[in-house]
Amino acid sequence: MPLTLQTFSTIADAGAALKASGTRYLGGGTLAVRAANEGDLSFSTLVRATDPALSAIAVEGARATIGAGVTMAAVAAHPGLAVIARAARAVGGPAVRNQATVGGNLFAASPYGDFTVALLALDATVHAGGGAIPVEEFLAGRDGFTGIVTAVSFAMPRDGGFRFLKVSRVKPKGVSVLSIAAVVEEDGDGRVTAARIGLGCMADRPIRAKAAEKALVGNRLTADGIAAALAVAGEGTVPPTDAVASAWYRAEVLPVHLKRLLLAR
Ligand SMILES: Cc1cc2nc3c(=O)[nH]c(=O)nc-3n(C[C@H](O)[C@H](O)[C@H](O)COP(=O)(O)OP(=O)(O)OC[C@H]3O[C@@H](n4cnc5c(N)ncnc54)[C@H](O)[C@@H]3O)c2cc1C
C-alpha cells in the first residue's frame, strides 16, 4: 500500500488533517516509519508539522518547556537541561537520538519510553490542543488520544535532585530491562519530604511507584531508611515479558536497582 506524507506549517492545519481516517502523526518517525515498513496497515498517511514551536526549548527561571518535536540529541546538548540530560542520552544510539522526539517518546510502548519515565518523576505537564494535563493522566489515557502533543513542561529539579538509571543488557545503547527516574526532596535533617519515582518496563507504559514514594517520606536515604520503600517497590507493577527480560526477572531486580539509585550520592 502506498504511504503518503503530508507536511503542514502550522499545528492547527496538521491537526485538521489528522481528523481523516488512516492518518497518523509523524514525529521523528523511529517507531511510526518502522511500523509502516513492517506492514502496519492501520494508517496510509503520515502527517507532520514544521511549526517552529514544536522544536523550541525554553528554560526560564525554574521552569523548562520542551517542544514535542525536540529530539533527544537536542535535549542532551542543551546547557539548561544538563540536569536531565542523562535521561535523553539513555534513548537508543546516536542515530536514533537524532530523530527520536520527546513527543514520540510519550507514545512508545514498553520496552521503550525511557525519557517519559523521567517526565513522570519530574511531574511534567503535557500540552496539547491548547490544554495541559499531568503526564501521569496523559499516559493513562494516551490510547484514545488523537491530537498533537505540542510540548511538555516541568519545574527544573535542583542540581543533583534528579536521579535516573537505565538497565540494559547491551551497553551503551541496548533496550531497557527497566529504567527508573526519581526526584527526592529532603529537609535540612536529611529526611525525605516528598518523592516521585517513575518506572519504565514495569507495565505496558511508564508508571509511578506510588507505594515506594509514600514509604520514603519521613525517612532518610540510608539502607535502613529506604528498606520499607524497597519492600513495596513492585506494588501496582505488571512487568512485561519480552525478548529482553521476563516479567519475573524485572520484578526481582527492580528493588536492587532502586536501592542503587536511592543510595547514590
Ligand atoms: C533502534 C531503536 C532503538 C530505540 N531505543 C530506544 C530506547 O533506548 N529508549 C526509548 O525510550 N525508545 C527507544 N526507541 C523508540 C523510539 O526511538 C523513541 O521512543 C522515540 O522517542 C519515539 O519518538 P519518534 O519521534 O521517533 O516517534 P514517531 O515514530 O514519530 O511516533 C511514534 C508514535 O507517537 C506519535 N506521536 C509522535 N509525536 C507526536 C506528537 N507530537 N503528538 C501526537 N502524537 C505523536 C506518532 O503518531 C506515533 O504513533 C528506539 C527505536 C529504535 C528504532
Image: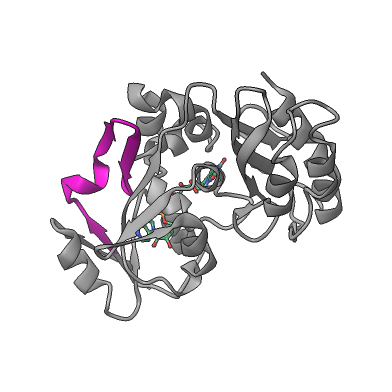
Residue 67, how many percent across, how many down? Answer: 29, 45
Q: Is residue 28 left or right of residue 199?
A: left
Residue at horizontal 53 percent and vertical 37 percent from the top: 92
* Visual colour scheme: one colour
Q: Is residue 190 above or below residue 200?
A: above
Q: Is residue 60 left or right of residue 124?
A: left
Please, which residue is most extreme toward the bottom here?
A: 21
Residue at horizontal 17 percent and vertical 65 percent from the top: 12
Which quadrant of the rendered structure holds the C terminus? Answer: top right
Which quadrant of the rendered structure holds the N terminus? Answer: bottom left
Please, which residue is most extreme toward the left here?
A: 9
Residue 238, how many percent across, how many down? Answer: 75, 61
Identify which residue, 90 or 120, lies in the foreground: 120
Residue 82, how many percent across, how many down? Answer: 42, 23
Residue 227, how many percent across, how many down? Answer: 84, 37
Q: How many marks?
A: 0
| Viewer can see residue 88 | yes
Residue at horizontal 70 percent and vertical 30 percent from the top: 261
Q: Is residue 26 left or right of residue 38?
A: left
Q: Is residue 135 above or below residue 199?
A: below
Residue at horizontal 39 percent and vertical 45 percent from the top: 101
Q: Is residue 1 above or below residue 63?
A: below
Identify which residue, 215 or 78, lies in the foreground: 215
Residue 110 within the segment the image draws in magenta? no
Please, which residue is most extreme toward the top here?
A: 265
| Viewer can see residue 29 | no
Tell me which segment is drawn in magenta: 47-69
